[in-house]
C-alpha cells in the first residue's frame, strides 16, 4: 500500500509540475492598494495552499472535538464496566448465599416432612383417614 501511495504521489507531482511549466505566463494580481505580476502557476499554487490551510484548520478543530468525545465515552465505558463487575460480584455472592440457604432449607424441609408423612400415615386409623 505504501508503494502505491508513492507511485500516485509521483504521478501527481509530475502532472502538477508540467502544468506549472505550461502556465508560467505572468498575470496581474490586484489587491486593495496595489498589484503584482506573478506567473499563473504561482497564483494557483498560493490559492490552493490557502484553501488547504483553511480546510486543515477546520478539520483539526473537528478532530479535537471528536477526541474529547472519545475520551468522555471511554471514561463512561470504564465506569459502566466497573459497575457491571460490582453487580456481577454482588449477584454471585447472593446466588451463592441463596443456593446454600435453599439447600439448607430444602434439606430441613425434606427430612421432617417425609418422616412426618410416614408417621402420620402410620398413626391414622382407617376412620381418621376417611375423615381426612
Image (tube, rainbow, N blue to C red):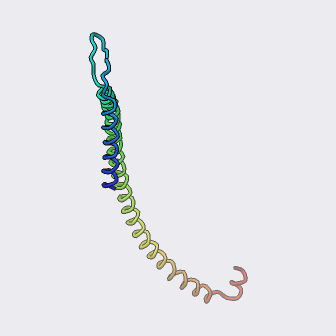
Quadrant housing the C terminus: bottom right
60 vs 129, nearest the viewer: 60
Count of numbered circles in the view: 0
> What residue is shown at x 43% (from left), y 69% (from top)?
98
Residue 117 as seen in the image, left or right of residue 6: right
Q: Is residue 35 above or below residue 4?
A: above
27 vs 98, nearest the viewer: 27
Residue 125's image quarter? bottom right
87 vs 75, nearest the viewer: 75
Q: Percent from the top left, x then y, of residue 93?
A: 37, 66
Q: Percent from the top left, x then y, of residue 99?
A: 44, 72
Q: Percent from the top left, x then y, of residue 28?
A: 31, 17
Q: Is residue 61 above or below residue 77?
A: above
Residue 28 as seen in the image, left or right of residue 103: left
108 vs 33, nearest the viewer: 33
Residue 64's image quarter? top left
> What residue is shown at x 35% (from left), y 33% (from top)?
55
> What residue is shown at x 50% (from left), y 83% (from top)?
111
Amino acid at each position: 500500500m505504501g508503494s502505491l501511495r508513492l507511485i500516485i504521489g509521483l504521478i501527481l507531482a509530475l502532472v502538477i509540475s508540467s502544468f506549472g511549466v505550461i502556465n508560467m505566463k505572468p498575470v496581474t494580481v490586484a489587491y486593495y492598494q496595489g498589484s503584482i505580476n506573478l506567473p499563473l502557476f504561482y497564483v494557483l499554487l498560493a490559492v490552493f495552499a490557502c484553501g488547504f490551510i483553511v480546510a486543515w484548520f477546520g478539520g483539526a478543530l473537528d478532530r479535537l472535538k471528536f477526541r474529547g468525545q472519545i475520551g468522555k465515552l471511554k471514561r463512561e465505558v470504564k465506569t459502566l464496566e466497573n459497575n457491571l463487575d460490582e453487580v456481577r460480584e454482588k449477584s454471585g455472592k447472593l446466588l451463592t448465599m441463596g443456593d446454600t440457604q435453599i439447600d439448607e432449607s430444602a434439606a430441613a424441609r425434606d427430612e421432617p416432612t417425609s418422616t412426618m408423612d410416614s408417621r402420620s400415615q402410620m398413626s391414622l386409623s382407617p376412620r381418621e383417614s376417611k375423615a381426612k
